[in-house]
Image (cartoon, coloured by chain):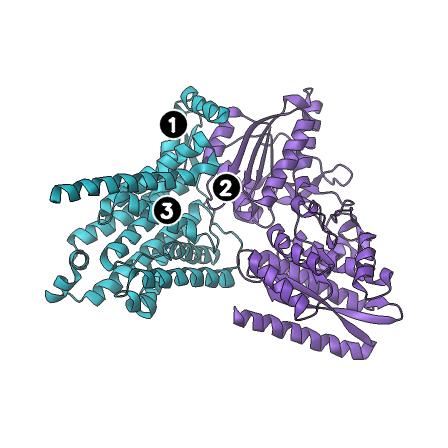
């Protein structure tokens, strides 16, 4: 308790730290938001809850790391991971996902859970279980007497995440395929009747999701560290963010990602860093409670 | 998993073949040891380091004439199973080694957690186990009679950094009780031991612990703690969180431009902080069980430096990196078995257990002498400082080859 109070008083004593926390949180949240966006897409369009989401992220990270180790500029790893993971996503869709898509919830959960284990183990066998990261030789910008630090590498990562997210959102709004995806999400049967090849839409969506995750992973390896078994962290965050934002609310996913990032950092400061994730999960509980209350009200008014 | 098991069976089968060949030449019989070790899963890298250490030692002992028990000679041969880095799997495999393969002597698995899972099994069947990779002190307060560890327990890993900080503060005209300590460790048995050791030593000097936090297991971000470090300005920062903790700490300390006079972490070598982060890792203190520059030696492996050279010759994949201490201590564990068998003069496992308990052995890895509880009390932990990309021993002072760079930055 004393520690919590002294932590709060530190925040009041040095107000500038608040700004730093928010900036840190947004930079973290931006990366989680990317994979959460992909999850929301697959969940909304195909009703597949992809438990291998985080492992796609880590796989993308390893692709970028391997390229960087072989002399490719780390920033080029992002598009490379996007493309390679697109292919892998397509393969996984053809091999596994297209068989479980029409089945009930548990079949797809089990299938993607199995995928998660397989991907992690394959990465482990190929790359070993050491933690890896790419160090970019960019300096760090300091503001406000050095209290606020913005590593240019991180800034670049957030910028690329923004560009990617903007690209995907525009594509969904304007692109012909984007429209088909949205139509399929609304009503797959009606979309089929109207001549949309839903199988193609599904495989495109799943590949796109894998590609987004791959690009996110290529950014993660530049700002944090990766290890074959860290996928679950990203999977959990994605689920928390998507649930908090509400299904079908794609722009909301991005906002929720940033918000959860910032809130977690506050939680870490006040309650200790060990409780950083607890804050995210508590938030999820709160959102679910509120949602249930809201829905009750809606039902009542219908009756 | 079945396939992997097949592979390890095949591997041990091949080993058997090889040792059978040399047995004909030297008239040495096989002496079977068993080990469940992590060949897949999150501890796979270190599990393989340990296995290579076992195999290298077995080879060296064979070249030196095998294990002489009475007037017969034996060569070690190990049955390995892959525990997938999971405790329950490790315990099952230990049962299998003992019941189905009728193994009478065990070598340890990798990590404190796996050792904790397997020790009750070996204890139940009264199978002596010499382990080299489980450092948590919680292994040695359960009254286990058949468990022996060649390495120093984990609360000693970074405690010497506190002593070093006290010395430095006295040199600079202050008193040790003015030193402010910040501790950030992961929430697992190993790291919590490190924290306990540091806090105990800090209390001894009456130092003030200004930050004491636990890092979450699965998040590689500690910017919140480092911001606090900037605000409260401690004199010593201690971080322990395996490879991930080391990599995250070194990267973010540099990014956030955190200036602390002394920073001590674990797992520097495993995370290859020098290779990954270059100058950012300079002047950081790293704890190690063993270093090839130490002046220990024995008649099988020679000096620590010779061990490093010969191991690299036998395992070329280590050519461009340092031989990890995990490998050295695994070799030392096999050496303890050889020494104990020869002193016992019999294959009776109870006699062998008693011989192990009485071990007092000088090795390339350091002195080995077990306490009542089974941990090695004769070998100190060593602190190395990264100086211009080189790991130089700076503490304890009896082994120091270089002076400490202090304060950092």
> Which chain is purple in the rendering?
B
Q: Is residue A216 above or below residue A105?
A: above
**Any part of residue B255 in sight:** no
Whether residue B151 is visible to the viewer of this picture, yes or no, is yes
Q: Nearer the viewer, residue B102 or B246?
A: B102
Q: Residue furthest front?
A: A303
Element under disc 2: helix
Q: Residue B335's image quarter?
A: bottom right
Placement of B313 over or under A271, stated as above or below: below
Q: Which residue is mark 3?
A: A237
Q: CA distance from mark 2 to mark 3?
A: 23 Å
Count neighbours of disc 2 (C-alpha within 10 A) and say few if under 14, some if 14 to 19, many if 20 or more.
many
Label drawn at residue B251: 2
Report x, y in % for residue B108: 67, 58
Q: What residue appears at the point 71 percent right and 24 percent down from the top-left corner?
A: B171
Among numbered discs 3 and 1, the one appearing first in the sequence: 1
Q: Give the letter of the cyan chain.
A: A
Q: Callout 2: residue from which chain?
A: B
Could you classify mark 1 by the number of other residues whose Cα lies within 10 Å: few (under 14), some (14-19), or many (20 or more)? some
Residue B341 x, y percent position in the rendering: 82, 62
Q: Identify the secondary structure beneath mark 1.
A: helix
A240 vs B26: above or below: above
Identify the residue shown where x is 53% and y is 48%: B276
Name the residue: 36% across, 56% down. Answer: A51
């Amino acid at each position: 308790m004393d520690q919590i109070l002294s932590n709060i008083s530190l925040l009041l004593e040095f107000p500038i730290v608040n700004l730093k926390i928010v900036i840190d949180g947004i930079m973290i949240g931006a990366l989680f938001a990317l994979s959460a966006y992909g999850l929301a897409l697959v969940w909304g369009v195909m009703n597949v809850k992809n438990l291998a989401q985080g492992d796609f992220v880590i796989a993308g990270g390893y692709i970028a790391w391997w390229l960087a180790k072989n002399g490719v500029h780390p920033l080029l790893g992002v598009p490379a991971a996007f493309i390679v993971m697109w292919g892998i996503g397509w393969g996984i869709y053809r091999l596994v996902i297209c068989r479980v898509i029409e089945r009930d919830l548990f079949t797809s959960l089990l299938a993607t859970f199995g995928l998660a284990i397989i991907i992690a183990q394959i990465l482990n066998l190929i790359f070993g279980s050491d933690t890896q990261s790419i160090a970019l030789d960019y300096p760090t910008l300091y503001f406000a007497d050095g209290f606020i630090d913005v590593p240019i590498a991180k800034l670049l990562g957030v910028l690329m995440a923004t560009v990617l997210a903007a690209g995907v959102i525009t594509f969904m709004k304007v692109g012909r395929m984007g429209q088909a995806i949205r139509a399929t999400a609304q009503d797959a049967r009606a979309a089929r009747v109207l001549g949309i090849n839903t199988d193609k839409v599904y495989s495109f969506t799943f590949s796109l999701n894998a590609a987004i995750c791959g690009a996110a992973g290529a950014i993660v390896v530049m700002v944090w560290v990766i290890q074959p078994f860290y996928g679950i962290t990203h999977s959990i965050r994605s689920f928390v963010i998507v649930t908090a934002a509400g299904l079908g609310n794609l722009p909301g996913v991005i906002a929720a990602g940033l918000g959860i990032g910032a809130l977690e950092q506050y939680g870490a400061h006040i309650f200790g860093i060990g409780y950083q994730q607890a804050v995210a999960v508590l938030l999820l509980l709160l959102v679910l409670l509120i949602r249930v209350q809201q829905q009750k009200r809606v039902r009542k008014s219908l009756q | 998993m079945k396939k992997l098991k097949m592979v390890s069976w095949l591997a041990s089968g091949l080993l058997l073949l090889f040792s059978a060949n040399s047995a004909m030449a030297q008239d040495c019989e096989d002496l079977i040891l068993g080990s469940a070790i992590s060949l897949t899963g999150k501890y796979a890298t270190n599990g393989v380091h340990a296995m290579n250490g076992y195999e290298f030692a077995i080879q060296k002992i064979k070249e030196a004439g095998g294990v002489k028990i009475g007037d017969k000679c034996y060569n070690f041969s190990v049955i390995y199973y892959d525990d997938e880095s999971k405790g329950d799997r490790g315990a099952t495999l230990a049962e299998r080694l003992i019941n189905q393969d009728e193994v009478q002597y065990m070598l340890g698995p990798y990590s404190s957690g796996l050792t904790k899972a397997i020790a009750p099994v070996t204890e139940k069947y009264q199978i002596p186990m010499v382990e080299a990779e489980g450092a948590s002190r919680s292994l040695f307060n359960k009254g286990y009679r058949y468990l022996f560890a060649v390495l120093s327990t984990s609360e000693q890993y970074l405690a010497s950094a506190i002593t070093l900080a006290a010395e430095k503060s006295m040199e600079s005209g202050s008193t040790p009780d003015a030193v402010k300590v910040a501790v950030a460790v992961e929430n697992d048995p190993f790291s919590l031991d490190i924290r306990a050791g540091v806090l105990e030593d800090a209390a001894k000097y009456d130092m003030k612990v200004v930050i004491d936090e636990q890092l979450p297991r699965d998040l590689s971000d500690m910017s919140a703690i480092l911001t606090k470090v900037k605000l409260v300005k401690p004199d010593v920062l201690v971080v322990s969180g395996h490879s991930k903790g080391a990599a995250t700490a070194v990267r973010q300390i540099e990014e956030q431009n955190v200036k602390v006079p002394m920073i001590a972490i674990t797992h520097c070598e495993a995370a290859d902080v020098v290779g990954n982060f270059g100058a950012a890792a300079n002047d950081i203190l790293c704890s190690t069980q063993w270093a090839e520059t130490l002046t220990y030696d024995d008649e099988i492996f020679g000096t620590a430096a010779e061990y490093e050279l010969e191991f690299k010759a036998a395992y070329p994949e280590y050519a461009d990196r340092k031989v990890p201490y995990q490998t050295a201590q695994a070799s030392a564990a096999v050496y303890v078995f050889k020494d104990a068998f020869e002193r016992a003069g019999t294959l009776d496992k109870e006699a062998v257990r008693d011989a192990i308990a009485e071990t007092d052995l000088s090795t390339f890895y350091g002195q080995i002498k077990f306490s009542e509880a089974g941990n090695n009390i004769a070998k100190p932990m060593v602190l190395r400082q990264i100086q211009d990309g080189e790991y130089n021993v700076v503490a304890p002072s009896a082994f120091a080859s270089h002076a400490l760079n202090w304060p950092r930055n």
